[in-house]
Image: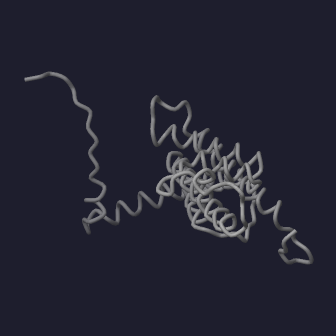
Amino acid sequence: MDDKLLSAFIDFIPNEARNEMLRPQYESELKERLINDVPNMVSRLAELDPIITIEVGEYIDFMREAVDAFQFGLWRAVVALIGIAAESFTDTLYSEFKNVTSTSGVSMTKEKLFGRDDYIPEERKLAVLFTFGTISSNDYERLRKIKNLRDRYVHPKEKAPSVEKDAREVIRLFRSVIKERFDRIYTIKEGKIVKR
């Protein structure tokens, strides 16, 4: 028999949640942990800049979930959700751009402009959106950085130096993208949002 120690992960919490006798105790412990963490949750939320947008796509839902994860200090979840939000945002803009260019007589061939129809890498979409002015150079760099940080966790080649730092960075970057897009396209006049 081998004397090596094995690492294991055992999770019996679902049993506690199902057991009618243990459930009240688990609920009480969970409630206490949450109450004790409320000051930290509020402090983390206060770190974020406010944003406004009227362009609401699925990416906003992912960002909202990322903000919830951020409040709870679920750093890997923040990186993953913001990575998904950024990709969804890119896909949304790219689809809109593709629809506009197909009817506007852009002189490039469809294949040269968009690449293969079945798969277009995110980097390619970002390059096209930047080239044609759909996104600013700042947003291009922010979205590329989000992708690279997300890839550090989704496709790890080595241990990431600081997941908390990276989570704070990606959420800040994505919220800046949303804010800059709103500021570039819209303004608020007499209490109403209007296009510039």
Q: Quadrant of the N terminus?
A: top left
Along the line of sight, the residue nearer the viewer: 173 or 24: 173
Q: Quadrant of residue 94?
A: bottom right
Q: Is residue 74 above or below residue 157?
A: below
Q: Is residue 22 above or below residue 9?
A: below
Q: Quadrant of residue 29?
A: bottom left
Q: Is residue 156 above or below residue 138?
A: above
Query: Where does the image place residue 100, in percent across and percent down from the top left?
Result: 69, 67
Classify residue 68 as left or right of residue 6: right
Classify residue 6 as left or right of residue 120: left
Residue ranking furthest to the left? 1
At 81% across and 64% down in the image, what residue appears?
185
Query: Where does the image place residue 143, in percent across and percent down from the top left?
Result: 65, 47
Classify residue 8 as left or right of residue 105: left
Along the line of sight, the residue nearer the viewer: 26 or 147: 147
At 59% across and 45% down in the image, what residue appears?
123
At 59% across and 62% down in the image, what residue appears?
59
Q: Quadrant of residue 10?
A: top left
Q: Quadrant of the C terminus?
A: bottom right
Residue ranking furthest to the right? 190
Query: Where does the image place residue 125, in percent across and percent down from the top left?
Result: 61, 51
